[in-house]
Amino acid sequence: LARLDTPGLLSQLDRYPYGCTEQVTSVAMPLLYLSRIAESAGLGARAETDQRIATAITQVLSRQAANGSFGLWRPQSGDFWLDAYVTDFLSRARAEGHHVPERAFDMAIDNLSNRVNYASDFDRGGEALAYALYVLAREGAASMSDLRYYGDEKADAFATPLARAQIGAALASYGDQLRADRLFGHAAESLGATTERRGWRSDYGTMMRDRAGVLTLVAEANSTAVDTDILVRDLVAVGRTRRSTQEAVWTLLASHALMKSPQTQLEVDGALQEGPFVRVLS
């Protein structure tokens, strides 16, 4: 928690002044898992956090188009990566017990399935496709043959380390740990080999975001193919205090995944303890 500045990043997102769909989603996503830390940081009790999540769900669904996709400021279609990101949030919210209207969620999943089914082949790219497959796999709606094809034949064609890790995580959720570990290793290696792109990226990302995302997915899958301590060290070494919404949210998701990992549980007097632990100094 301290190394990744979890309370500080939650506070930073809480102060974010804008409200496009990506930003609304980014502010709410970590609250699904880190409400206790948010409360200790003075961001509201659990009931307030739940209300903020409910408000975010309502807000993003107000921007859902008839085909199930999402626009940045109004109902609109065309941004495949944003569709996957918002659907990821809705999927995680449902899993944590928050109310997401069934019809709206089904439309979001159907939209991702349709986009995957009609996706064009690529020699370099595939960021949105990888994210969509990851979300669909977590919902049991991805095709195993698709995942194996993209994992075996297109791993080098994905343009970002995060995309490779998302295919790995999708395979892990279907029990194919061997392929998943290979892709996780490939993603981690490419973090050091990929140069930062200048300007805006269509997947809203940076190399710092990708590093945090790879860390999150490796930890969520409990994979031992990558040394997560090295990823944490490299993420902390960046040293920037002000981060984009994407950099902040994926770092917070990494914090949660690491806290849930069997390798990082705290043992007191021989008994495993529930986390996270926050010491508040008066």
Image (cartoon, rainbow, N blue to C red):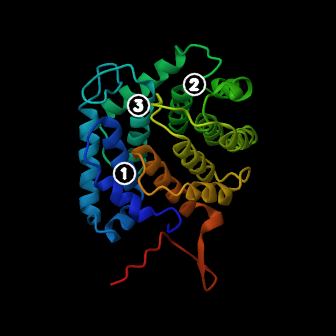
Residue to which mark 2 is pinned: 126
Front label number (2 vs 1): 2
- Distance, label 1 to label 3, CA atoms, is 23 Å
Amino acid type of the residue that numbered disc 1 sits on in the rendered structure? Gly
Up-down relation of residue 36 to residue 181 (above or below): below
For this view, does 94 lie left or right of residue 17?
A: right
Circle nearer the N terminus (1, 3): 3
Q: Secondary structure at mark 1?
A: loop
* Residue 130, percent from left and from top: 57, 30
- Distance, label 2 to label 1, CA atoms, is 31 Å
- Distance, label 2 to label 3, CA atoms, is 14 Å
For this view, does 73 lie left or right of residue 269?
A: left
Q: Secondary structure at mark 3?
A: helix
Which residue is more in the foreground, 113 or 20?
Answer: 20
For this view, does 115 lie left or right of residue 151?
A: left
Amino acid type of the residue that numbered disc 2 sits on in the rendered structure? Gly
Which quarter of the rendered picture does the C terminus lie within? bottom left
Circle nearer the N terminus (2, 1): 1
Farthest residue to the front: give it: 198
Which residue is more in the foreground, 143 or 237?
Answer: 237
The residue carrying pointer 3 sits among few (fewer than 14), some (14 to 19) or many (20 or more) residues within 10 Å by Cα, namely many
* Residue 75, percent from left and from top: 26, 24
Q: Secondary structure at mark 2?
A: loop
Taking the spot 74% from the left edge, 37% from the top edge, the residue there is 179
Taking the spot 44% from the left edge, 24% from the top edge, the residue there is 80
Taking the spot 34% from the left edge, 60% from the top edge, the residue there is 11
* Residue 152, percent from left and from top: 74, 27
State the mark number for residue 97. Answer: 1
Front label number (1 vs 3): 3
State the mark number for residue 82. Answer: 3
